[in-house]
Image (spheres, grey):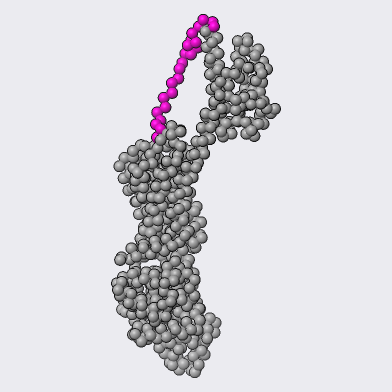
Amino acid sequence: MSAMLTVWWKEVRENLRDKRTVFSALVWGPLFGPVFFAVMMNTLVTHELKKAEGPLKVPVIGAQYAPNLIEALKQQGLVPQAPLADPDKAVRERDADVVLRIPADYGKAWTKGEPAQVELIYDASQQGSSTPRQRLQDMLKRYGAEQGALRLLARGLSPSVAVPLVVSNRDQSTPQSRAGLILGILPYFFVFAVYLGGMYLAIDLTAGERERQSLEPLFANPVARWRILIGKLGAIGAFSLASLVLTAIAFSIAGHFLPAEKLGMSFDLGPGFIADAILLELPLIALFAVLETLVAAFAKSYREAQTYLSLLMIVPILPSMVMSFMPVKAAPWMYAVPLLAQQIGVSDLLRGTPVSAASIGMALVSGFACAAIVGVITAWVYRSERLAISA
Amino acid sequence: MIEVKDLHKAFGEVKAVNGVTFTARDGEITGLLGPNGAGKTTTLRMLYTLMKPDSGQVLVDGIDAAVDPIAVRRQLGVLPDARGLYKRLTARENIEYFARLHGVENAVMRQRRDKLVDALEMRDILDRRTEGFSQGQRVKTAIARALVHDPKNVILDEPTNGLDVMATRGLRAFMRNLKAEGRCVLFSSHIMQEVAMLCDRIVVIAAGRVVADETPDALRAQTGEANLEDAFVKLIGTEEGLAA
């Protein structure tokens, strides 16, 4: 058995015996994303649906001034609540999403044929207030339009006279693409799985070995250090890959528990998606393995390496964050940037947009090229005298 | 045979090794004696090519360590100052790992391993994970691991450090055995009795230099002291860092 394989097998076997490493690489890493995701989506969707379809409870002040209006709103699903003494405060403190106030002179304006005013009191900065406000506003608009049309008819005019312009909305999004918007965070979980899958191994195999003083006897063997390094990188990569595959499988199972059809969305988490996503993420396995080893080689202790690598975990989040705050159009060059390529590639795949072989090829080439460059630096650091010496 | 010629190694301003020359011959036990911090470990680290000397030459069986470090390491069995066993592996797996790294055939490896296990009397701990081993059990495992490829030259850095009396006696017998097999045994120590008892040749190091390189008898004659302990103190110039 060659020296590289010997090192690889020993590291894999030794780390499979470490509960913490196995838990973080093969349980926590792969399951965190899918479980978090399924729970979050379900809560969100249930909440939204309740607000969008259920009876709309709104406190109404001055309902006695406009009985006809209230009756019409009731038919549209409004359930008037008792008036509040201080509607402004109630809205600010989230006791009510929106409050309807009808002034005392409503009836006078109405009978005169002047525009009668009603007030909506809400706080736009409160999350969750926009849906009920929108619904109430639409109800009022509909009532206003109906009454306007009746008045025109009473005067012998066609109601269409008052409607010079009609806007027709044609949404080009497909169910898949609407899902992709919500699932924008999903690509990060794949990157997270790859990163976390190898992290504890990378720490253990370099900083840990040094701390336990086993690097010095290891380097006394007649094996070039770069061969030892490759064996160790292979072990890290094997754990990363296992973590990634488990994540993909877990997502595809979690996909069955997502209430996608309720939102009129659909997304593709089938075997085709899994295969393409894993292929896209492959260069990250190599890149993270060398990067994590490089950082661990600089750390003086296990704990120090752990701190550095936890901080470094922010880096793979960046493309996801940027993409969700500033949705930019995916350009071909983005596939040449590792991490960005995985982000847009996986979101496209989710959305059901096929990713061209050229794009996948570019992601693979650029990712592995980056890994090779960092790998050369890591190998150079691995040659240093100080690496082996713990005290 | 290990030949060391005028080795120098500095860490910044500190000259850890400042002109060390000696020869350790086959079939002999050579002791590297010196107080703590004299440069023993650094010298040994340059022998097994963990460190590169600033100047000077190391030859193991005629192979230059600067030219072919991997061939040099193949000729050596090394027990470094850092024992560093793999805690999650058993003693047997620790030994087999190093055997494979040396490219030893499985059948040969099993034979050698069994021989070492018997010689070191460690059969009872062979299939236990090394986590929680006593100091003596750790040293035994580390030695078996270092010698499983049957090296002609054996380097032991403070092998009896931290061992109890029984373990120390066993280890000394084991070292005499290695000598009887015709190997070149080089070990470092700061314990005078041990060096006096075991060695055919004593290399005394102080402050990075060799201050004596003699047989125990010649050393006594050279310093004019009948007692070896007094001889060492005279050579080193101080009692600091030595143990009786």
Q: Residue at x 56, y 33 (%)?
A: A128
Q: Nearer the viewer, residue B14 or B115?
A: B115
Q: Tell me where residue A382 sits by quadrant.
A: bottom left
Note whether residue A234 is visible: yes
Left or right of A353? Residue A35 is right
The image shows residue B152 at horizontal and vertical percentages of 33, 80
The image shows residue B144 at horizontal and vertical percentages of 39, 76
Q: Tell me where residue B62 sits by quadrant.
A: bottom left
Q: Residue at x 32, y 79 (%)?
A: B61
* Span colored in magenta: A154-178
**Image vertical order of residue B97 relative to residue A261, above or below:** below
Residue at the limit of the structure toward the top, as seen here? A156
Q: Is residue A177 magenta?
A: yes
Left or right of A147? Residue B27 is left
Q: Nearer the viewer, residue A176 or B160?
A: A176
**Image vertical order of residue B161 relative to residue A216, above or below:** below
Q: Main secondary structure of the magenta part?
A: loop
Q: Nearer the viewer, residue A218 or B48?
A: A218
**Image vertical order of residue A262 relative to residue B148, above or below:** above
Q: Is residue A160 magenta?
A: yes
The image shows residue B210 at horizontal and vertical percentages of 44, 82
Q: Tell me where residue A292 sits by quadrant.
A: bottom left
Q: If the image is split into quadrants, where does the N terminus of chain A sit?
A: bottom left
Left or right of A59? Residue A36 is left
Q: Residue at x 61, y 12 (%)?
A: A114
